[in-house]
Image: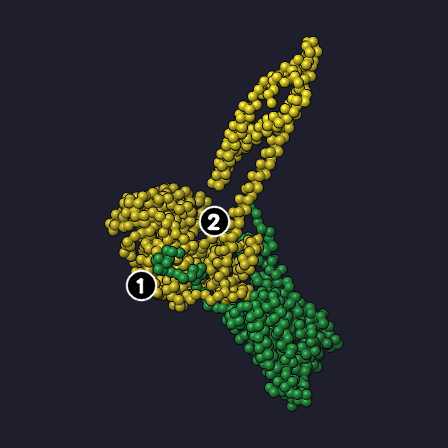
Chain colours: A green, B yellow
Amino acid sequence: MSLIASSGSRPSTLTTSPHDHNGRNTAWIMQQVLLSMLPGIVALTGFFGWGTLLNLIIACATAVACEAAMVALRKRSVSFYLRDCSALVTALLIAVTLPPLAPWWLTVIATGVAIIIAKHLYGGLGYNPFNPAMVGYVVVLISFPVPVTAWPAPQPLLASGQELLGLWESLYHVFPFLAGAEGHIDAMTAATPLDVFKHNHSLMVDQFYEVTPVFTHGYWAGAGWEWVNLGFLAGGLYLLYRKVFTWHGPVAMLAALAVLAIVFYDGGSSVSKGPLSLHLLSGGTMLGAFFIVTDPVTSAVSNRGRLIYGALIGVLIFVIRSWGNYPDAVAFAVLLMNFAAPFIDYYTLPRTYGHDKPTRATRPQERE
Amino acid sequence: MTTPSPATRSPSTSDVLIPARQVAAQQLWPIPGGVHPPANKQQALGESICTPPLPELLVVPLQQHIGNPATPVVEVGDVVAKGQLIAAPDGALSVGVHAPASGTITALGDYPVPHPSGLSGPCIVLSPDGDERWTERRPIANYAHATPAELLAVIRGAGIAGLGGAGFPSAVKLGSQLPIDTLIINAAECEPYITADDILMRERAADIVLGIQILAHILGQPAQVVIGIEDDKPEAYEILVAACADTTIRLVAFPAKYPSGGEKQLIQLLTGREVPSDQIPAEIGVLCHNVATIYSVARAVVHGEPQISRITTVTGEGCTQPRNYEVLIGTPIRHLLALSGFTASSSERVIMGGPMMGFVLSSLDAPVIKTTNCLLAPSVAEMPPLPPAQACIRCGLCAEACPASLLPQQLLWYSQAGNHARLQAHNLFDCIECGACSYVCPSHIPLVQYYRASKGEIRAKEKERIAADLARQRFAQHQQRMARLQEQREIKRAARRSELAGAIDSHTTTATVSGQPAEDLIQAAARRAAQKQASPAQQLAALERRLVAAQHLRDTAHEKWLAGTVDHLPTAQLDGLRAALEEAELRLQGAHNKLEALRSGQKERPRSHSDNSPDNDGQESP
């Protein structure tokens, strides 16, 4: 190094190749994800009222606070870690998963569990084996099933003269202590299309669609819900276009779900497991396909692995929806497959250049 | 073979491309992955190739290639002519070094050399006299009349090593003896900023075509000879089309994408064949040479000029006048940069090579060597230092960019964990270190650096393991030998015992027959034996001498054998050495046993003597 000093030249730091970078960073990816959730959030707000936005604000505040606290506890730079925006993505996912007008503490608990337990106790961003938002959601779903399943009626379902709750009413609803004892207003709730359909045991699908308000007010899969799903589909397509993720996971999941829906449609009989449109455009299908399945940290890593991972999630969703106790199943299906992701990875290595076939990650070390 | 060979790349906004019609007309086998960094090629292409003035000193490193460093054949004070051999190749995998100019050798010693380690290396320092007095050149007037062996000798003698970046001795690559059906000329130059090959093709196309024909001649006219060029070099393409008009050389243009100029990638792109892991392209009948190397071959054969200069691009915003130079090997980089308007304040670092695979020079006093295709002095704004790395979110952008279809995110994971078995199962050693993964990593993780470190660790461990295996083998053989010896001794002992028993029997019989008392015979035998041992002290000394001699013999044999294994001598020779060693060991063991026997005998004898042999009194001296 004395030579460098004596020659008075380069460089203070020795960097290694490559010396150039395309300029994209993690924060950019997270911001793209946040941006692409807009159509879905707009649809949710349009059909279900202010509740989603309130969820969003509470979840974001909780997420940032928890993230900052955990990072500080772990003695890292808070500003550096907050800048990656990953906590906000978790917060948004929880905000759109929980029913609008959910009490504030529900959102706080779900978000807190997601950030503190599911994310930071496992080592923070990049190290969590389970999708934090789904863990947070499932924890409150199991612990507080009543408020978590109480979805307000979508706007088209309201009787004439009725309207969605206004901002102040919504606020009082979410923060009951603001309103005091007598100011409390109950929002009208309605079962979700998947829930409604699950409880049909006697009618043909066509008949059922004709007599059930949530379907008569919608085009394909239930009033409001279909638009929420289309909103998330649009956001997902945008992310695909920006190459934030590859098509493999979402397409595999939707395809598996679609195939099973077609197979078990049963010609629309009374034991039908529901039409294709219901499965694709209701519940959390599109949100799951484009925002949960694609979570890179907790999914399989190779394209082949993501095909399998996605497809199995699709299968699980259908199985739980059709034969399980829950009307929707995205969260459970995703969490179950999170378990399996490392295993899938072992067996789905791509074929490397110069090799005849793909290797297995568990291949014993070659000895010469 | 792990480094993509040469070259360079680039698409980009402003560049004129080769018409898509021409590109589409060629059959290509698209390679997976790849990235499209901004090409930045126009900056240095504004002017034609320029010859810089002679520097005051030329510092010529002995190692500018893959293989053994060359051995100096000059002394300080020697006056040399331009092109004279100043360091001879050391062994088959090595190339010689020639004087880039006529002048005086002023020093031999360690000087800064361009190497990622930043370490110094042995160099020959030459003070040019400006006479440009050439050594005797022996051009070959018509290469077609020369045998491949003669041409290979010329290429080897000219000290040509792959100019694309790897610096592999060209004559070794060409002389592999494997049947070659496809000769690929790498004119891709896929790495951004570098235009050395581009401008060479524009200005010296005739020599390049000649060089290709010479190579084809050496290889016995392979079935196809293809030049692979990226579509962002339309001028060079047009010129080559004209130059190749009357030949069978096929020119294939393909869309610019980094790293399509990597040797393995280019072979895949042009032939659809993949070089099997751990093998060289020649094993699938393909040979790939960089266009600049081809030019050097032509100069060596047709003009008798050894490799003493090359085309180097000097570019980057740190240089006010980026351009291409035909620069003498050994020219200090500082000299070249100064000509291009570089000042110490204008750039934070100077990179040798391109932005994707080059390395930062630790000293600007280091010279230009045979593999210096580019000197890049980017401004801070042009290539800002990377922010600190964030955690990997396994987004998979790296896997999408990897031209070798690896899973960089998994490799990173196992690299951090030091899990070498998993790294190898994920084919770490198929990584060509092109840097595409790091280029796209949104978490700014220096992925390639992790892989380099892990490769180094695994190689070091492998070496250790081989050494340990060798030791274990040696020990096992030793045990076997000892067991064999023991067995032989047992057999001998048993034979002797039965012999003795037989002898006593016969004596008894004889005695009975002859009527002589048997006791006399036994006593006589005992007396004879005792006489033999008359001077135990002398005997002991003699045996000890024998032991020392045997020990020495064994040590020498052992050393020879060890040296033999280290030098990788042929098996037959090694076997001979091992046999000698075993024999020496046997002898040592024998001497040792005898000495032990004598010593224990001395200890025991006095007792036996006093106990029960009063007869022997007079003969034994305790």
The residue closer to the viewer here, B313 or B392, is: B392
- Tag 1's secondary structure? loop
Tag 2 or tag 1, which sits nearer the N-term?
A: 2
Circle 1 chain: B
Q: CA distance from mark 1 to mark 2?
A: 42 Å
User: Which residue shows up at 51% across the image and 29% down it?
Assistant: B549
Amino acid bearing label 1: Gly
Amino acid bearing label 2: Ile
Circle 2 chain: B
| Viewer-side label of 1, 2 | 1
The residue closer to the viewer here, A166 or B296, is: A166
Q: Is residue B245 visible?
A: no
Residue designated by label 1 = B341
Residue A210 at x, y percent in the picture: 69, 81
Residue A314 at x, y percent in the picture: 64, 68
User: Which residue shows up at 37% across the image and 44% down it?
Assistant: B71
- Tag 2's secondary structure? loop
Please rate how many residues cluster around mark 1, counting C-alpha atoms within 10 Å: few if below 14, some from 14 to 19, many from 20.
Answer: few
Q: Which of the 4 quarters of the picture holds residue B324?
A: bottom left
Residue designated by label 2 = B280
Residue B618 at x, y percent in the picture: 61, 17
Q: Residue B162, relative to residue B544: is it above or below?
A: below
Residue A118 at x, y percent in the picture: 62, 69
Q: Is residue A299 visible?
A: yes
The residue closer to the viewer here, B5 or B335, is: B335
The residue closer to the viewer here, A238 or B523, is: B523
Q: In this rendering, would B161 be left or right of A69? A: left
User: Which residue shows up at 55% across the image and 60% down it?
Assistant: B413
Q: Residue B347, relative to residue B432: is it above or below?
A: below
